[in-house]
Image (cartoon, rainbow, N blue to C red):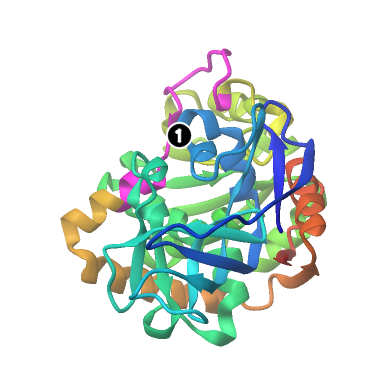
Amino acid sequence: MAQTVQVLRNNITTARTQDTPLGTLAESAVRLKIESFAVTSNNVTYAVIGDVFGYWNFFPGEGDWGVVPMWGHAVVQASSHPDVVEGERVYGYLPMATHLDVVPGKISDSSFMDMAAHRQPMSPIYNQYMRLAHDPEHDASKEAERMIFGPLFKTGFLIESFMRREHWFGAEAVILTSASSKTALGLASVARHRSPATRRIGLTSAANMEFVEETGLYDEVLAYDALDKLAQVPSVSVDFAGNGAVLARIHAHLADNLKYSCLVGATHVEARGGALGGVDKMAGPEPVLFFAPDHAVAAIKEQGAAAFGRDIAKSWHHFLADAEGTVTVDVRSGIDQARAAFVEMAGGEVDPSLGIVIEP
C-alpha cells in the first residue's frame, strides 16, 4: 500500500493523507520507495503557482486535490527495466508520498529521465533522476543539505547569473524580501562571491531579524515596517515572499530608482495581492516572474552542461561554507509528518533556522 499527501489546490493549507494500492509494475518501469525529502518554502511556491506552470501535473491528484512535488532520495524497490537494478539509490523530483513508479529512459551512468507520457510537456530539469553511485554532486554526509538547500540554491544561482548578464539593470543594490528563506540565502551567497559590488539588502519580519543578521550574508537587514529606510539608489528587487502589499510599498518608495522587479516565490500565501497573479497595479516596473527551469535550460545551452555544472559546484561549495551552522536539520518520521509540515510551511509558521526533512 502506498500513502500520498494530497493538498486542496484552491486552499493549500488543507491537506489529507490517502492510501492507494501499489498495483502491478508496468513493463520497463521502476518502483521507487521514497526514503526522504525536504519540505521548504519552495514547495509552497510549487503549490501557489501550480496551475500557471503545471506543477500539479507531475504527480496527478484527484479532482480538486493535488500532490505537491518535493526534492529527495529514493531507493529502487522493484524494477522491470534491465538497466536499473533493485537497491539502487537516486535523487530527484518526488511526490509527497511513500512510492513512485517511473519509466527510465535516456539512461547514463549518472542519471536517467522519467519518460512517463504525462511528464513530457514539463521542463526536463524536473524529470531527471541522479543515480547516486555515479553522481558527481552526491556527498553522503550532505544528503540533508542537498534536499533542503539544493534546488533553492540553484534558483538563487540562476537569478544572480541572469542579473549579472543584464549588468544588474544598472542597479547598485539588490533588495531581497523574505530574506530568511533558503532561496534568498542562496542568492545572497552567490551575489556575495560573484557580484560583490552589488549591495545586498535583506527584508524580513521583526521576529526573523536576528537570524538573518547572524547569517552574515547581507550588507543591511531591515524589518518590513522600516521600508522607508531603503536608500534612494538604483536598485532591483527580488521578491521571495509574494506579499503584494510589501512589494507595492517597495515600488512606491523607490519609484524610478527601482530598475527591475523580479518575482520568485510565495512564502506569504495569504497576502499575494499584485505580487503573484493579483490584479492590483503597482508603481514602477511591471513585476516579472522568474521561472528557474527555463533559465537553467538556456544556461546549459549557452555554456554547455560541463561548464554550467562546474560553475554551480563552485558556488555550491561557497554556499555550504556560508550557510554552515545557520540551519538545524529537523528529521521527522512518517507521511503524516509531511502533511503537517507542509501545512505549517504554507501557513508561514516554520522557524527559518530549521530545515525539515521527512522520512516517510
Q: In percent of the image, x 61 and y 34: which residue is there?
A: 48
- Nearest the camera: 245 or 79? 79
In the rendered image, residue 56, in percent from the top left (x then y), is placed at 54, 37
Q: Quadrant of residue 325?
A: bottom right
Left or right: where 168 falls relative to 190: left
Judge whether 235 appears above or below 338 on screen: above
Residue under label 1, please give it: 53
Q: In percent of the image, x 51 and y 60: which residue is there?
A: 25
Number of numbered labels in the structure image:
1
Q: In percent of the image, x 66 and y 27: which residue is there?
A: 64
Left or right: where 209 falls relative to 143: right
- Nearest the camera: 325 or 16? 16
Please state, as top left, top right, bottom left or bottom right, where the N terminus lies in the image: bottom right
In the rendered image, residue 36, in percent from the top left (x then y), is placed at 65, 69
In the rendered image, residue 166, in percent from the top left (x then y), is placed at 27, 44
- Nearest the camera: 333 or 215? 333
Q: In percent of the image, x 30 and y 70: which residue is there?
A: 309
- Nearest the camera: 294 or 262? 294
Judge whether 146 appears above or below 38 on screen: below
Magenta span of residues? 275-296
Secondary structure mostly taken by the magenta-highlighted segment of the chain: loop
